[in-house]
Image (cartoon, rainbow, N blue to C red):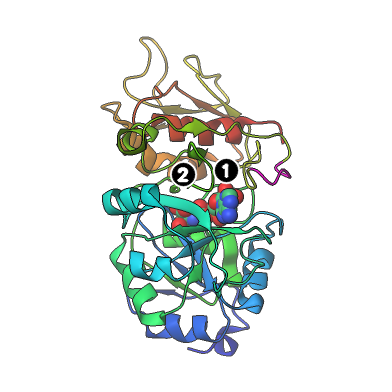
Amino acid sequence: MPAEDHAETRTAPIEPPGIDAAVEHLKNGRLVAFPTETVYGLGGDATSDLSVTRIFAAKERPRFNPLIIHLPDVAAARNHVVFDERAKRLADLFWPGALTLVLPRRPDCRVSLLASAGLDSLAVRIPAHPLAQQLLRAVGRPIAAPSANRSGRVSPTTAAHVRDELGDRVSLILDGGPCRVGLESTVLDLTVEPARLLRPGGIAQAALEAALGPIERAAPIADGVARAGPGMMSSHYAPGLPVRLDALDPRPSEAFLAFGPPPAGSRVPDLQLSADGDPSEAAQHLFAALRALDRPEFTGIAIMPIPEDGLGAAINDRLRRAAAPR
Ligand code: TXA
Ligand code: MG
């Protein structure tokens, strides 16, 4: 359906798997939201300045914060960025998957400079979700896709979340069900030696270190303007309500989000991230839980402590930003 046909409606149609319309929209400069195994992405043709401009506008995202470029396979990625030995090893081990590599842009790279905010590096990722794979293969162009939420807010892990976030700012939402990982990809900067972890995410730091040796963790910065780590703003991933971390004693007015068994004598949790205390399961449920508890009858969201192991580090990174001063 052409975008004009539903210009009057408030929200984009949500489609079951079916990609012809999505390809048509993307080739005509329009935006399509699609599932990946991490979170839903807001996709646009990365080679088109117009499409990329529309992505920034739809998200109300600051232009200095560069986008991740999605490709179907390593061969396609090699057309745009320069691989070194480290990149080859990580691509073999973790692609397709929840890892984004920041690599030097090739001189003949066709990706819009607006997408990478004028940097001479480019963030590339090969998503594993079958629908994302189908879409990328069918469209045959690099697709820029930030998470399909308005800037600063919680990333969407279902098609309905995308509709709530973006309404008619997107031409079509491909519905692939809830995302399996639930947290954004790990972003690793390979333009420096040793490699720098810019964003913890769906692949744990320990797994990367097992392949590469020690990796430096870039410190989050206060205002996000620094070139070294664009997008690492301290306040991000934030629901409307204030968030209180490491909470074992929820106040009566607070929503209570548990991880594992609640403390003896505490009240019944409003939601549970993982009854067994499994960080991967908690990651899968995290963003949906924050959305579900973000309701006016509560004064805040109190969240139990989550250990740093496995995906715990990435969960805590998101929660610290959700709790950061706005
Ligand atoms: O899982 C994901 O990565 C999702 C799905 C849709 O693929 N995408 C996503 O994109 O989270 P976004 O735009 O929300 O986050 C991209 C992150 C930002 O922190 C951005 O600053 C960083 O990647 N980034 C992108 N290009 C970069 C570059 N050239 N140098 C340093 N950081 C970069
Ligand atoms: Mg995002």
Mark 1 or mark 2: name the one nearer the start of the chain.
1
Q: Amino acid at mark 1?
A: Tyr
* Res. 161 in view: no
Q: Quadrant of residue 198?
A: top right
Residue 23, position as x, y percentages in the image: 43, 82
Q: Position of residue 212 (x, y in %)?
A: 36, 37
In this rendering, is residue 217 above or below 109?
A: above
Residue at horizontal 31%, vertical 58%? 96
Camera-side mark, 1 or 2 = 1
Residue at 52% across / 36% down in the picture?
318
What label sits on residue 287 in the rendered view? 2
For disc 1, the marked residue is: 237
Q: Quadrant of residue 118?
A: bottom right
Tell me what residue is drawn at x 65 percent, y 76 percent.
Answer: 49
**In this view, 39 is above or below 23:** above
Mark 2 surroundings within 10 Å by alpha-carbon count, few (fewer than 14), some (14 through 19), many (20 or more): many
Report x, y in % for residue 53. Answer: 67, 71
Q: Is residue 142 magenta?
A: no
Query: Magenta segment, which residues?
Result: 224-228
Q: Determine which quarter of the picture holds residue 61.
A: bottom right
